[in-house]
Image (cartoon, helix red, strand yellow):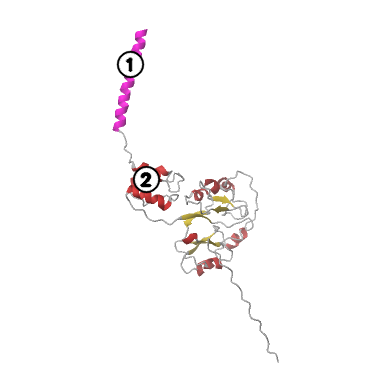
Amino acid sequence: MTNIIIWTIAILAALGLVLSVVLFLVAKKFKVEEDPRIDEVEAVMPGANCGGCGFAGCRAFAESAVKAGNLDNNYCPVGGADVMSKVASILGVEVKASAPKVAVVRCNGTCEARPRVNEYGGAASCKVKASLYAGDTLCQWGCLGCGDCVSACKFGALSMGPATGLPVVDESKCTACGACVKSCPKGIIELRNKGPRSMRVVVECVNKDKGVLARKACSNACIGCTKCQKVCAHDAITIESNLAYIDFTKCKLCKKCVAECPTGAIHAINFPVLPAKKVEDKPKETGNEQ
């Protein structure tokens, strides 16, 4: 009986040794050498793993950048120019300069401008709400107000305005990762160039209904009247499907369209407030005494 146990142990030990050798040889033969620069690139990344670059995370971005051999299709919006210059240095390539971007909410349907006509009692999710019906108001295009974008933002750059019921972007925290853009089922958030001194002119509306219906649904809606387009001297405004859109690459920030819009759908963001002009008192006219 003792001999049987000893032989069993010996056979199992020998079998384990043989299998270990086989596994070692197989692993050595099929070993995939990984470029050490992948680890270097990942080390300088911000580690947000937000997906704003179009990849699953910072590691995936690093692998893509190293394999591509250039940065033409790779850009980290969170790290920005500083991180990209470090990545370019590791890879020994040049990186194209990219204008900083920021999330912009294209809805100005405040509680006053867009009164409620329905009461929603379901799950507090814009995605769920959008799948069930058009929304609480007559506008089927605007913000649903459940804050999916706020939950999606990993940087605390979004909050819901208590007075307006609309998302508010904190530009000092926004990294332009695009998570809020992807989370909005109505597509009212987009990434735009910050612009010089963070100044921008934006049509804060996505309503494509005809003017009368759009204005009935929201007093701040774009009605597609084309007045803004006619006054723009830079060909920056297009009207499509009853909706105006400003191309930020062409806009010269003259603000003529802002003054021309009859509904206030176009907003000038971060422009300095000019002091009101003082009205000088005219000298009183006195008649010549006879």
Of helix, strand and loop, which one carries label 1?
helix
Q: Quadrant of residue 250?
A: bottom left
Closer-to-camera residue (118/183): 183
Amino acid under label 1?
Answer: Ile
Is 79 drawn above or below residue 284 in the view shown?
above
Amino acid under label 2?
Answer: Ser
Quarter of the image with the N terminus is top left
On the image, numbered disc 1 is attached to which residue? 11
Left or right placement of residue 130 versus residue 234 in this view: right
Of helix, strand and loop, which one carries label 2?
helix
Please provide percent x and percent y for residue 142.
57, 54
Left or right placement of residue 35 versus residue 183 in this view: left
Q: Residue at x 32, y 27 (%)?
A: 23
Please provide percent x and percent y for residue 219.
61, 61
Please provide percent x and percent y for residue 254.
50, 67
**Magenta span includes 21:** yes
Q: Which residues are magenta?
A: 1-29
On the image, numbered disc 2 is attached to which residue? 64
Q: Residues within 10 Å of mark 2 (few under 14, many from 20)?
A: some
Q: Residue at x 49, y 55 (%)?
A: 102
Check the image and name the residue furthest to the front. 289
The answer to whether any part of residue 73 appears in the image is no
